[in-house]
Image (cartoon, rainbow, N blue to C red):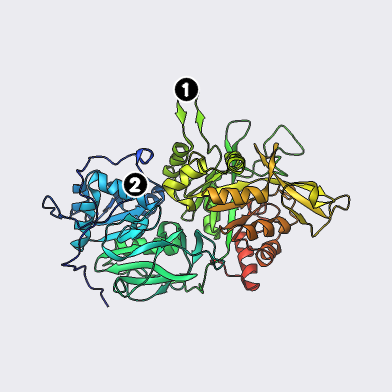
Amino acid sequence: MEAAPFTSPSSTCKTSSISSSSSLISLSKISYRNHSPFKFKSRRNLSVRASNDDSVVTLLDYGAGNVRSVRNAILHLGFQIKDVQTPKDILNARRLIFPGVGAFAPAMDVLNNTGMGEALCSYIQNDRPFLGICLGLQLLFESSDENGPVGGLGMIPGVVGRFDSSHGFRVPHIGWNALQITKDSEILDDIGNRHVYFVHSYRAMPSNENKEWISSTCNYGDEFIASVRRGNVHAVQFHPEKSGDVGLSVLRRFLLPKSSLTGKRTEGKASKLAKRVIACLDVRANDEGDLVVTKGDQYDVREHADQSKVRNLGKPVELAGQYYSDGADEVLRRASENVFVPLTVGGGIRDFTDLNGRYYSSLEVASEYFRSGADKISIGSDAVHAAEEYLKTKVKTGKSSIEQISRVYGNQAVVVSIDPRRVYLNDPSDVEFKSIKLTNPGPNGEEYAWYQCTINGGREGRPIGAYELAKAVEELGAGEILLNCIDCDGQGKGFDIDLVKMISDAVSIPVIASSGAGVSEHFSDVFSKTNASAALAAGIFHRKEVPVQSVKEHLLKEGIEVRI
């Protein structure tokens, strides 16, 4: 049954009426202020005139986050892209996609200061074909509590609030979850009980006032709004461009609403948030200057037989594409145009000055990663320094890379990579850091250990433990922890369960277990014995010793939900 078109004679667009600009504003120059929602009164007549080219999709890219992923998906489906430069481009769009990425307040600043918000409201009120993604859904509501309250566009009744983590649910909500479709939405027709990918800390809740908008919900502690639809206006909280073939079908349904899309739909058994299996690509230049995927043995990437050569396990783009085809839930590597699952990129996320004396903030560096196709960025050594300073002063300066990036892009975009090594102890009172009793005693029978954090690829130890670092970076604004272990790296004997359990029990943000996987059973072991949200491997996948699909089949047999 067709949904009712958008009609709202009393509806008002609650965005500031500020003179428009012909170009979007640099996010690094945005002021973070609260927006007070008030009734929108247009100072000029805004007429909506659609273009006639069916092959063109208008994209509202306001300058934050990984919009390249949406671009790649649109191009993959055979469409051309027209970028919004002025409010008129919105009004003249035949179909408009708004892939909102980042934090609520900076996005509203851009919409207000460029006149885009006013045009966007007019476009939607005229029931023109619209698809909002993630923040592009949230901005349609009246306001958000994120760094707020901050006024939204006011098209849909409700306030966007933060997930409640008090009952053991980790925030941000990151990963592959199931939808409960509540009414015909057309664009969700091919999902078929399969998982879609979410990454967010804030959500809108169903109510009597907005129930006519809701087309699907998702359960994560509470039932929240996963998608809305009224007439030709659609918006989704999940990321179709990162949801594999399922997500591409959502985009295809929006872009080709009248076509008869054929093909057998694959039915899934999605019921809740799935555990993630992540493929990691360590990319670096070899001695010939070529970028290759390598793998360390306790962080040593040189071949044992020939110490002069960097271990070469393949080409980055080819391996990333293979892992997408094999069903990996995420890939950590340089961006690829044909990988429609999340990409996390790490390395070099810090303030620096180049050889010409030009200073770059960590926010500027991260912005380039996002614009190049990264969905999340991973911070290593710089996070250690920031945590040490924070623990010493107890002051959040707002200047650390974690704070800067999470303020603009949201904490779900910031992963902190922890590289600890075991330091064995006979008595836990010997150190000031959190220590644990080991399941397997140390080489000299030691029953305890603390985990010393390192920087610079494990080459330099620091006076801070993994437990203390994890707690500090969560407070500074990190949204996820990638937990490595130098002792287990490349050994194939399993994850360090003691370490993973300690850290995943200590924080309320998701933890990715890394280092040591050798067989499928190691994945079920870490998921059943700890609160890890995801598990990562590299060498066993690169060398095809254990295919990704074999790991997932094993996990399903063990009763652990994964995306299939």
**How many residues crowd around disc 2 within 10 Å: few (fewer than 14), some, or many (20 or more)?**
few
Q: Can the viewer see residue 484?
A: no
Residue 55 image position (x, y, % from top left) = 26, 54
Q: How many marks?
A: 2
Residue at numbered disc 2: 33
Name the side, left or right, on which 30 lies relative to 174.
left
Determine contact: label 2, label 1, CB under 8 Å: no
Name the side, left or right, on which 400 lies relative to 418.
left
> Is label 2 in a helix, a strand or a loop?
loop
Residue 215 image position (x, y, % from top left) = 34, 72
Assign the C terminus to one quadrant of the image. Answer: bottom right
Q: Earlier in the sequence, mark 2 or mark 1?
A: 2
Tell me if residue 501 comes above or below residue 477 in the rendering: below
Residue 437's image quarter?
bottom right
Q: CA distance from mark 2 to mark 1?
A: 32 Å
Q: Give the camera-side residue of 436 and 234.
A: 436
Residue 241 image position (x, y, % from top left) = 41, 57
Q: Residue at x 31, y 50 (%)?
A: 108
Assign the N terminus to one quadrant of the image. Answer: bottom left
Tell me the number on the disc at residue 357.
1
Q: Amino acid at mark 2?
A: Arg
Q: Residue at x 54, y 60 (%)?
A: 327
Q: Nearer the viewer, mark 2 or mark 1?
A: 2
> Residue farthest to the right?
444
Tell me if residue 131 comes above or below residue 35 in the rendering: below
Residue 314's image quarter?
top right
Name the side, left or right, on which 467 lies relative to 204.
right
> Is label 1 in a helix, a strand or a loop?
loop
Tell me the number on the disc at residue 17.
none
Q: Residue at x 42, y 74 (%)?
A: 180
Q: Amino acid at mark 1?
A: Gly
